[in-house]
Amino acid sequence: MAIHLARRMARVEPNAIGELLALGADPSIISFGGGYPDPTLFPAEALGQVMAEVIAAPGGQSMQYAPSDGLPELREQVAALMRADGTPCNAADVLILQGSQQGLDFAARMLVDPGDVIVTEDPTFLGGRIAFDPCEPVYAPVPMDDDGMRMDVLEHVLKTRPKVRMIYTIPEFQNPTGVTLSLERRHRLLELANAHDVVVLEDTPYRQIRFTGETLPTLKSLDTEGRVIHLGSFSKVLVPGLRVGWAVAAPALRAKMALLKLANDTQTSTLNMAATSLFLKKHDLDAHVATLRAAYARKKAVMLDAMRRHFPQDVAVTDPEGGLFTWATFRDGFDATAFMRDVALPEARVAYVPGGSFHPVTERANTARFNYSAQSEARIEEGIAALGAALKRHA
Amino acid sequence: MAIHLARRMARVEPNAIGELLALGADPSIISFGGGYPDPTLFPAEALGQVMAEVIAAPGGQSMQYAPSDGLPELREQVAALMRADGTPCNAADVLILQGSQQGLDFAARMLVDPGDVIVTEDPTFLGGRIAFDPCEPVYAPVPMDDDGMRMDVLEHVLKTRPKVRMIYTIPEFQNPTGVTLSLERRHRLLELANAHDVVVLEDTPYRQIRFTGETLPTLKSLDTEGRVIHLGSFSKVLVPGLRVGWAVAAPALRAKMALLKLANDTQTSTLNMAATSLFLKKHDLDAHVATLRAAYARKKAVMLDAMRRHFPQDVAVTDPEGGLFTWATFRDGFDATAFMRDVALPEARVAYVPGGSFHPVTERANTARFNYSAQSEARIEEGIAALGAALKRHA
């Protein structure tokens, strides 16, 4: 039989990188490919306690259906976290999501018709493109420099491209580059979005994991017109396996996203919302995040130090102020995908993510993303040394 | 600011019934409105134990990211459950979902372009329509009788309507009517789907909750051409708050749905998949389901007996062989929505779901869905008595 698929499915195809990364699942490979937090830092004991408590609570409410917007107490706690972070927010502004990834899907479905334009950073988070693609957008990638998305190029795009519906950005420690959008550019981005009446989708999964420098205001906190949809997540600061994230948006947008939530999966897991809520009530999230910050800062330092010692001189890497990733640019003509397939995996036994697929339109071959959060410091040193030796052998 | 919304959002609107049912959340109201399982039957102790065990397991894998298809061991266990239920199935055929609701969304996104036709039972599950609506389908509702969807009407629809992409059915103890599709019609439905090359979306959230009569083969087990997408769920047999369901489909369709899963929310909660898997390994699901069957069979009997004693003679109700719902048809001219708003809620302090919104195209006013699983037997008797008295007072 030949099933007739919807037109959008032409944009829903497996990613070649996924197949390459699957090779890195071999435990004898040192993988810098994923975006996994360090499982040795998971608050397992605290999470076990709160989960036991919510399951044992009389009435069984933590196991029952819950409102599709999310548990009211968790929405209130998220709003309090947002306020503590400098962003005005009430519980009514919060929609609990199955991870912030779900917010990428909902934002695109809410705003983007086939042929509409989404502005992204270039390179950008692959999961964003995967979420947006079923809406059949056209991408307008805006290059980045050390201060994030270039505002001169953004201005040009907004002036020249019709039907721009959304500017997608990860302002802190961007995935894949590790770069942070400067304060000046945050103000400018909002000015431009206001002038051109475009929604801003602010994705902040790494925001709390800052090593150095001052915390910058969220785009949502600078938003005077209700045009910023802010996405947050407990995946990096608590555990990814809970799948609890959130959106904060103006009432009309939040309400539409809540209807998409109901349509899509009824609700996020009651158990996981209840456990997250009780964790926030009984445990010190700030103290836990401080531990993560210190541990990931050390790992980043270990990786960058190892890269300086072991990589050829012509490899440039970013020095992120936080988050999970650094971004390497190899010499012109270097093919990071071919090198991973032919050398890094079979010889050095090391995996990374070749950078090409992070570019929405024009792939560039000589870049790669390295994650430093998942591996131990010893494995980081070992893997970077092996990769550096292989790079020099094949230079 | 006036945000430009995608065209599909014209189909994503709040349901008036939702607002009416929200009034039923008052604890002094006896609500037969939801589709909640009885929380006193939740296996809290067993669930608490398995959750504690998976969280405490060395390595923290239950809290980490997991494959978007679902945990391999859970996919294998679901395949074994399917085989034990008479449906050939391997782990590779299974996609774990955030509840089977998510499968409704994915099936429509995979198959339905704007203006394409979805065949539904009439009346049909409201959550199905809510999931399908963003794909901008046209509905072709097929009336039901005591044996389920009428095959003569289905045949006529398939012969006369172009662009039918999907036949959506809940074969067992349908929501909202409680009616089961007969064996003869199951065979006929597959014949017609094969002849007209249409996908069948089989939704089975209540299948295991059978009180009387023989278990009938799933449509998937009768599918010789790989055109049935089967959806199953642990929400009714374990707990809804886990949000764990599954799809079983032919490789090409399952692969596309898996890509939509990755795009939509990355994965179902690792914790909840791991806990479900360990529950299936360490506890006797069949024994638990037997307990549920007995309890819900008693509740159904209590409700139908109370309706016979308290309701006016001209109210007809279905006698389901399983599941959570019975369907009432009142006299011609009766407006179940107005009666709920004006009498049932304020006077009788009872809620149900007026039947109108279950009809995709032509609403009918004189029907209502009653749930018997959520309330205690005493509250069922009390609520039906109060409602019956109010019906007689206002006849």
Image (spheres, coloured by chain):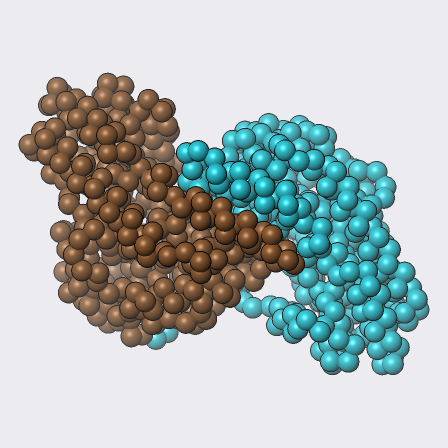
Chain colours: A cyan, B brown
Q: Quadrant of residue B354?
A: top left
Left or right side of A349 for A101: left
Q: Nearer the viewer, residue B73 or A222?
A: B73
Quarter of image, res A124:
bottom right
- Closer-to-camera residue (A207/B213): B213
**Is residue B373 among what the camera can see?**
yes
The location of residue B328, given as percent across then percent down, is: 17, 38
Residue at point 36%, 38% (across, down): B40
Residue B20: image x %, image y %? 33, 29
Does residue B123 lie above or below A369 as drawn? above
Residue found at x 13% / y 51%? B146
Position in image of residue B178 (x %, y %): 21, 47
The vertical placement of A239 against A57, above or below, is below
Locate residue A250, reporting x and y percent.
Answer: 58, 32
Q: Relative to residue A36, is residue A79 depicted above or below?
A: above
**Left or right: A168 in relation to B338:** right
* Residue drawn 33% across the image and 60% down it: B201
Q: Is residue A6 left or right of residue B296?
A: right
Please state, as top left, top right, bottom left or bottom right, where the C terminus of chain B lies in the image: top left
| Residue A224 seen anywhere in this rendered image of the structure | no
The structure residue drawn at horizontal position 72% and vertical position 33%, both measured from the top left corner, is A85
Quadrant of the image containing the N terminus of chain B: top right
